[in-house]
Image: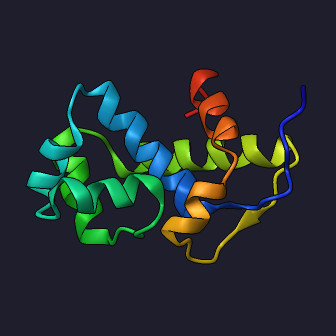
């Protein structure tokens, strides 16, 4: 059954999914990552869900602590975006609220993660 493409996918959600995938690959919890980013578990969770857009200083620390190059994060982000577009999703560059995030088709994000496209 095809997935609904009625709701645009915010790119902040795509970026957050990439952060989540890398964190999980490294075997870390949101609490651990939130600790070294000085944002706490709740603040970091908002980054992973796309509700809060991270800034460059967080990315520097994220890359250093998780031993990943910024180029790798960008490559995965671009691959994830391409996967969404190929499946017929529109992308949104607007901020997403927590309520809007709940309405997103999580199935597309799960599908892309399962296919190892990020």
Q: Residue at x 70, y 69 (%)?
A: 92
Q: Point out the residue furthest to the bottom here.
A: 94
**Quadrant assignment for the N terminus:** top right
Residue 10: image quadrant is bottom right
**What's the residue at 15%, 45% (across, down)?**
31
Residue 56 in picture, x, y percent from top left: 31, 70
Q: Quadrant of the C terminus?
A: top right
Using the rendered view, name the quadrant where residue 67 is placed: top left
Instruction: Point out residue 68 in the picture as x, y percentages from the top left corner.
Output: 29, 40
The x, y position of residue 88, in whole percent, is 88, 47
Q: Position of residue 84 (x, y in %)?
A: 75, 45
Question: Is residue 108 left or right of 69 when viewed as pictured?
Answer: right
- Residue 26 versus residue 87 in the image, above or below: above
**39 sits to left or right of 69:** left
Residue in the picture at 74% in, 62% down: 91
Q: Nearer the viewer, residue 53 or 40?
A: 40
* Residue 108 appears left or right of 7: left
Query: Which of the pair 101/74 is nearer the observer?
Result: 101
Tell me the colour scheme of the image. rainbow
Up-down relation of residue 73 to residue 102 (above or below): above
């Amino acid at each position: 059954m095809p997935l609904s493409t009625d709701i645009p996918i915010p790119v902040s959600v795509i970026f957050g999914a990439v952060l989540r995938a890398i964190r999980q690959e490294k075997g870390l919890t949101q609490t651990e990552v939130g600790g070294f980013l000085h944002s706490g578990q709740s603040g970091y969770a908002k980054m992973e869900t796309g509700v809060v857009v991270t800034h460059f200083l967080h990315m520097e620390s994220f890359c250093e602590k998780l031993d990943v190059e910024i180029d790798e994060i960008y490559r995965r982000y671009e691959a994830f975006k391409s996967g969404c577009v190929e499946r017929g999703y529109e992308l949104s560059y607007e901020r997403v609220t927590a309520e809007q995030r709940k309405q997103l088709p999580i199935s597309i994000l799960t599908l892309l993660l399962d296919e190892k496209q990020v």
